[in-house]
Image (cartoon, rainbow, N blue to C red):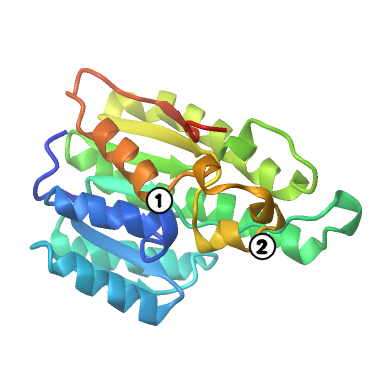
Amino acid sequence: MELKDKVAIVTGGHKGIGKALSVKLAQHGVHVAMVGRDVAALDAAASEIKKLGVQALAVQGDLREKDVIDRFVQQVIEKFGRLDILINNAGVGYFAPLSELSIAHWDAMFNLNIRAVFLITQKALPYLRQVGEAFVVNIASLAGKNAFVGGSGYAATKHALIGFSRCLMLEERKNGINVLTVCPGSVRTDFFQHHQSAKTVLAKEILEPQDVAQAVVESLKLPARAMVSELDIRPANP
């Protein structure tokens, strides 16, 4: 895909991996629309993106609410007139043994990590189909492939996201939509730093958000005849 002047939605595009993706896309001439709950971080990210010479749309909203998603996608179409790339990045994780995991935390993970992905992808599909060549990028995790203590809820959502993505890829490739599932290992973000295991991970054993963003963007830039459908990204020195 030629990225210049394309339009991308990045959920949670104002922090962590999402912000790195937003900035990297903007550096390649992509106009970026972000949605999230932190207004200050959204405004700061939008300002940074605009300085790169592209347009930015930052909308405050809770992706767990269908009407928020519907309004946001409509705002994107009204502002830019098209949609080429949807990156489902927003997510949440709560880590505890199953015997201690609350129903509230279980529901919160599935509502954002899976239900919101379903809702925004379904809403975006008609617009993605219109452009001829489009991408859905789902940021999953190696937790969707590897078990670990305390991860029953979070890992279940990422397993589900991988399965969702694989099916969507088969359904939509005939419509010109490529679906890329990205499974990073440990990445230095606020999300990871708040996880207990971060205390035992050395600097050389962790990825930076920019590593993930670079890998994703390079995958998007491949010729139309080629598609990366699944991408595992691990620290080089585990």
User: In the displayed structure, would residue 106 be above or below residue 14?
Assistant: above
Residue 144 in the image, given as x and y percentages of width and height: 62, 36
Three-letter code for the amino acid on which mark 1 is drawn: Pro
User: Taking 159 as reference, is 37 above or below it?
Assistant: below
Q: Which residue is mark 1?
A: 209
Crowd band around label 2 with a 10 angstrom C-alpha radius: few (<14), some (14–19), many (20+): some
State left or right for residue 27 relative to residue 19. left
Q: Which residue is mark 2?
A: 108
Q: Residue furthest right?
A: 99
Instruction: Name the residue nearer the viewer: 20 or 121.
Output: 20
Which residue is at 20% across, 32% downward? 221
Which one is in front, 186 or 71? 186
Res 212 quadrant in image: top left
Residue 23, located in which quarter of the rendered image?
bottom left
Numbered disc 2: secondary structure:
helix
Q: In the rendering, which numbered label is found on residue 169?
A: none
Q: Residue at x 62, y 47 (%)?
A: 201
